[in-house]
Amino acid sequence: MIKYSGQTRVLVAVDCIIFGFDGENYKLLLIQRGFAPEKKKWSLMGGFIQPDESLEQAASRILLELTGLKNVYMEQLHTFSDPKRDPVERTIAVTYFALIDIQKYEKQLSKDYHAEWFLLKEMPHLIFDHEQMVEMARNRLRYKAAMHPILFELLPDRFTIPQLQALYEGLYDTTLDKRNFSRKLLSTGLLVKQQEKDKENSKKGAFYYKLDKEKYTDDFQAFLNFIPKPDKLLS
Amino acid sequence: MIKYSGQTRVLVAVDCIIFGFDGENYKLLLIQRGFAPEKKKWSLMGGFIQPDESLEQAASRILLELTGLKNVYMEQLHTFSDPKRDPVERTIAVTYFALIDIQKYEKQLSKDYHAEWFLLKEMPHLIFDHEQMVEMARNRLRYKAAMHPILFELLPDRFTIPQLQALYEGLYDTTLDKRNFSRKLLSTGLLVKQQEKDKENSKKGAFYYKLDKEKYTDDFQAFLNFIPKPDKLLS
DNA sequence: AAGATAAGTGTTAATTTGACACAAAATTAA
DNA sequence: TTAATTTTGTGTCAAATTAACACTTATCTT
């Protein structure tokens, strides 16, 4: 087999920024790194790419190992390449961010990894450039969610409008007018009202909604302008 | 030095999608590949990452070699990783797209590479997955330009409003109402009217404008909504 | 001098947005 | 059982933005 001679070959890591939402706050799934260097320090879940898999496959594999979940929403974020980013050996890191319904997460699966959910606001220090990765993922999510109905990926099958509003308010660290918010969300036609109410979180109870799956798939790329004056909120 | 043992190391290529605009149409700078396999076939300009440079440095280096230009607008696009994408050896390709003022391009510099500008619409077949890369870059550019004043990077220091409109119309393959278009562009406050007119392209002549550099830098991330109903135009 | 070409500009109606407040449902406390 | 508390759910109106639309001006050519 012909080879490209005289070129450097490097390790390629895949790191996953995994977001969840507990109903009130954004969370991040982290692991305690199991090997040197920085053993026992908190880290994003990652791994090296294998000879016969693509990066997408690697990211899905890593996510499955950690959470037991398949078909998770995932998006390539950025490739980090500072020659000194990993002190052991030149390693390039391709990052993916994932949005999961925290309720589907299987705790036992990830015991091997000492995985834990952290409040995004109270994230511990992470190894290498992982904090920078989280920051970038958060910015990307803010950007994208301002225009596309992506945050539904964080919610269970049924959800209420107040929950949805908390989701948006949490991401942008702001408050939104509930009348305008529900008008806008309902006007997308993506929500199907259910008969039952969620009585867990309030006395009156809030009606459940489900996503119109077909419309959701079709409109995923539509510009829906969820956030008033996004440039005021995006960094 | 400790190493991560038992892991595969792979080649990392950097490929650049270089856009230009000739006043009427979008162009793409391509080279004739100088080595096997696919020697003499048209290809994006690229190269392998070197041991002590980041991807950004590699992309800038490649762009400088090909065009003689520094400080070009460039953005990481996506990392391509199909295990079979390069038939010779497993290679991961990190792509960057660049916007350059075609007038600043130095032809002689790139003679070594047999570089040529192609009309984007008449792009030849490219090696490997490079056509897919171009397609993705084009979509990213459409997306971004719908909201951010990025297309100025393709124009010379002074430009006219009709030129600007051709730039937007070309990207979205549509026509825009010139009254609404110029009103919107002028309302950004980014344009500074010059006294001189461009008499090359019309009898009456069109006034030149320049960018307000400071405001441009500040407002680069602002959401300016240049394109009416972008979801109708973005794929 | 008349004709051709492209630049430049203003109005209006429709839509969308943002600001705002009160009634309804159900639980809890008096 | 009645009153108080909490949170859901909804409607209006003014302001801003958008989209649709046509004529005049400048200059070159014939």
Image (cartoon, coloured by chain):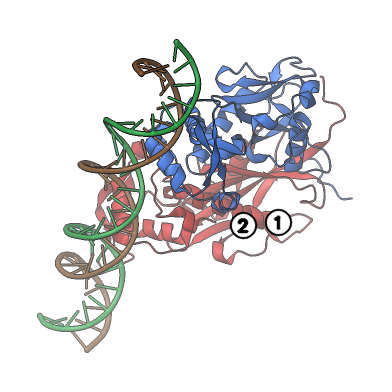
Chain colours: A red, B blue, C brown, D green
Q: Secondary structure at mark 2?
A: strand
| Image point (41%, 42%), residue name | B183
Tag 2 subunit:
A
Which of A222 and A63 lies nearest the eye of the viewer? A222
Q: Check the image and report above or below for A85 versus B53.
A: below
- Identified by mark 1, the residue type is Arg
State the residue at coordinates (38%, 37%): B179
> Secondary structure under badge 1?
loop
Q: Which residue is mark 1?
A: A33
Q: Are the residues under marks 2 and 1 on the same chain?
A: yes
Q: Residues within 10 Å of mark 2 (few under 14, many from 20)?
A: many
Three-letter code, disc 2: Leu
Q: Is residue A218 left or right of residue B192?
A: left
Splitting the image into 4 quarters, where does residue B97 fall?
top right
Q: Residue at x 65, y 55 (%)?
A: A132
Q: Which mark is residue A30?
A: 2
On the image, the x and y values in percent for residue A6 come to 87, 30
Q: Which mark is residue B116?
A: none
Q: Is residue B53 left or right of residue B20?
A: right
Residue A105 visible somewhere in the drawing: no
Relative to the observer, which residue lies in front, B179 or A77?
B179
Q: Is residue A216 above or below residue A115?
A: above
Q: Quadrant of residue A50?
A: top right
Please indicate, yes or no, whether residue B212 appears anywhere in the rendered image: yes
User: Answer yes or no: do the residues labelled 2 and 1 have beta carbons within 8 Å?
Assistant: no
Q: Residue furthest right?
A: B1
Tell me residue B227's x, y (percent).
43, 38
The answer to whether residue C17 is above or below residue B141 is below
Q: 10 Å neighbourhood of mark 1: few (<14), some, or many (≥20)?
A: many
